[in-house]
Image (tube, rainbow, N blue to C red):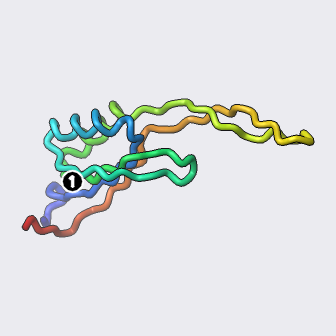
Amino acid sequence: MTSQENQIYLALAVIQSQDERKTSEALQEAGFDLISVATHGALLGRRNSTLLVRVPEAKFNTFIEIIQTYCRERTEYIATPLEGTPLPIPISTPITIGGATVFFIPIESYEEL
């Protein structure tokens, strides 16, 4: 793999667990090799899936388009304490969650055994 055109990336896509099935199916239909791992978000305590995907340079845009299509943002509400009151009265605060967080790691070499 000396040419930049042959560059391979390992994509780590952290997505919501409810988006995992359709996203994985779409990626596999497009010819991507992937592994799905159940993960857990620390900030909101939500269940996620992390997809480990082999992404050739030539299919980079296709990968991004699939992730954008199937991993959508959602609005959820969390209880937050109302400031300035003698009792801790929780109020519902809308937050936007979802979409995807994707990390790309260039692969210098790999072996298929």
Q: Residue at x 14, y 57 (%)?
A: 6
Residue 65 falls in which quadrant of the image? Answer: top left
Report x, y in % for residue 45: 54, 48
Nearer the observer, 5 or 54: 54
Give neighbour class at mark 1: few <14, some 14-19, many 20+ (Cα, 10 Å).
many
Give the residue at mark 1. Answer: 54
Horizontal side, residue 63 vs residue 73: left or right: left
Q: Is residue 69 above or below residue 8?
A: above
Q: Residue furthest front?
A: 87
Q: Residue at x 36, y 35 (%)?
A: 19
Report x, y in % for residue 106: 27, 62
Horizontal side, residue 94 vs residue 72: left or right: right
Q: Residue at x 20, y 44 (%)?
A: 59
Residue type beneath disc 1: Arg
Nearer the observer, 107 or 99: 99
Nearer the observer, 32 or 79: 79
